[in-house]
Image: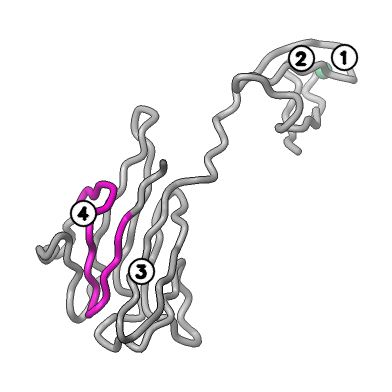
Amino acid sequence: MKRLKCPQCEEFIIFDENEDVQDGMAKLECENCGKRFKVRLKPKRDDLGEVVVVENVFCEKQVFPLKLGDNLFGRKCNGTIVDAAIDTGDMSMDRRHCIFNVSEKDGELVYTVRDNESLCGTFVMNEILQKNEKRIIEDSEIITIGATTLILKTKK
Ligand SMILES: [Zn+2]
C-alpha cells in the first residue's frame, strides 16, 4: 500500500499500488473532497541484477541480489556488517573488500565497482582497480577479490 497527499485538500489517500495502477499511472479519488486525479508512479524495480560468487576450494556458489546505490561486499565474519557477506575461507578477501554500485541514468541501469581499500585489491577482467577508481562494468564481466571470482549478472 502507498500513501499520497490529495493535491486539493491535502488529506492522505491510501491506495494499492498493485491494483489501482495501470501503465504506471494511478487513478485516484480523494474520499475527503472528491477530487479525482492521476499520478505517475516510478516503475517498481525489484530485479536489479545480481553478483554470482563462483565456487572454488574456499566456498560454494553464492548469489547476491543487488540494490540501488552502494552494495558492500566482503568475507562473512561475525561483527562485520556488509550488504553481501560471502561465506568463504578465502583469507585474501577482506571483510569489507569492494563496493558494487547500481544507479539509474536515462532509464538505464549503470553498474560500477570500486575497491574498498582492500589489502589485495579488486580486479576487473584481470586489471587491478586504481585507488578511487570507479569502473563501469557490464553483464558477465569478471571481478576478482582475493582468490575468488565474482560475475556480474545485470537485469534481464
Ligand atoms: Zn481531497
Q: Of the residues tagged 4 and 3, which is closer to the observer?
A: 3
Circle 2 sits on which residue? 8
> Are the two marked residues, 4 and 3, in contact with CB atoms closer than 8 angstroms?
no
Q: Earlier in the sequence, mark 2 or mark 3?
A: 2
SS category of the residue bearing label 1: loop
Residue 134: mark in rendering: 4
Q: Tell me the SS state at disc 4.
A: loop
Q: Is mark 1 within 8 Å of ligand 1?
A: yes
Is 138 above or below relative to 19? below
Region of the chain picked out in magenta, as a range = 134-152
- Label 3 sits on residue: 53
Viewer-side label of 2, 3 = 3
Q: Secondary structure at mark 2?
A: loop
Question: In this figure, which residue is indicated by the disc labeled 1?
Answer: 33
Q: Position of residue 99 (x, y in %)?
A: 32, 62
Going by the numbered disc 3, the residue's amino acid type is: Val
Residue at the image position 60 percent from the left and 22 percent from the top: 24
Amino acid bearing label 2: Gln
Instruction: Return the disc, 4 or 2, that comes first in the chain's sequence.
Output: 2
CA separation in Å, label 4 and label 3: 20 Å
Query: Real-space Cα distance between discs 1 and 2?
Result: 8 Å
Q: Residue at x 11, y 65 (%)?
A: 126
